[in-house]
Image: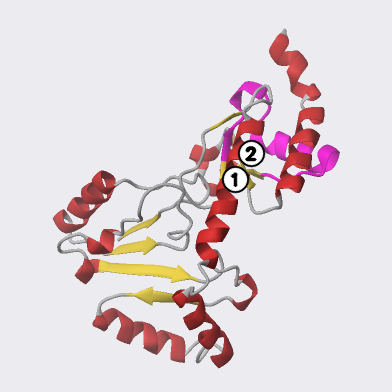
Amino acid sequence: MLIFNSPNNPTGTVFSEAILRELAGLAKKHDLWVIADEIYARILFNGEYKSIWSLAGMAERTVIIDGFSKSFAMTGWRLGYAVAPVKVIDALDMLVLNTFTCAAEFTQVAAIEALRDSTNAVEAMVAEYRKRRDLFVTGLNRILGFRCQAPDGAFYAWVNITDTGLSAEELQKLLLEEAGVAGIAGTAFGPSGENFLRFSLVSARNLLEEALERIQRVSVHWRAAISR
């Protein structure tokens, strides 16, 4: 089985159609199922979203996992769904019936309205996230020792902190305890995140600006070492 998340948490990477075709070829060659986590599919800053499900021969071997917590800000209701071949859905039905029976009816009704999105709320939200992304990423790149590429989707900033000379765990603790800014050490997402911090972009712009100012003040801890 192949499992991937695009747009990605924590990096904000969006797989290109070329990459999706490579993954599809791999799945077909080795007769693999694909679980495509598309929870951030509507939070895309450029272009149209392309699902691996839409590629030739992939609908019968792909399970799309999606939900309402990210695109529709329905985090507390914990409502999600899957798109899959009938035989997989039948098995999922059995699993659901023997674990939690069903989601509350009123949340399902609300979810239908959310999917219709008659007021273009998602489009407006993504436009605001784009502004927050541009503001925060630009500010992060002005902090000595930080390097951050603008994410193509989702709402996270994935920051390379190698040049600070501190480990991600040390920096995470320093920012939280001395600046009141919460970032997550990249190792929480696997060993390849060793020299990275992940920040969320969902806070209001004035709070993101304040966070940048606080990080800048605390950066005195590593600026002197970089300057030497």
**Residue at 16% across, 58% down:** 28
Is 175 contained in the magenta span?
Answer: yes
The picture places residue 160, in percent across and down from the top left corner, at 57, 31
**Residue at 61% across, 32% down:** 138
Residue numbers of the magenta segment: 158-183
- The chosen color scheme is secondary structure
Instruction: Report which residue position mark 1 lands on.
Output: 131
Residue 225 position by quadrant: top right
Amino acid type at image mark 1: Lys
Mark 2 neighbour class, 10 Å CA radius: few under 14, some 14 to 19, many 20 or more? some
Is 7 contained in the magenta span?
Answer: no
Quadrant location of the C terminus in the rendered image: top right
Q: Name the secondary structure under disc 2.
A: helix
Relative to 151, 75 lies left or right:
right
Front residue of this view, candidates 135 and 170 = 135
Instruction: Report which residue position mark 2 lands on.
Output: 135
Residue 74 against residue 44 in the figure, above or below? below
Residue 122 against residue 210 in the figure, above or below? below
- CB within 8 Å, label 1 to label 2: yes
Amino acid type at image mark 2: Leu
The picture places residue 44, in percent across and down from the top left corner, at 45, 52
Relative to 124, 208 lies left or right:
right
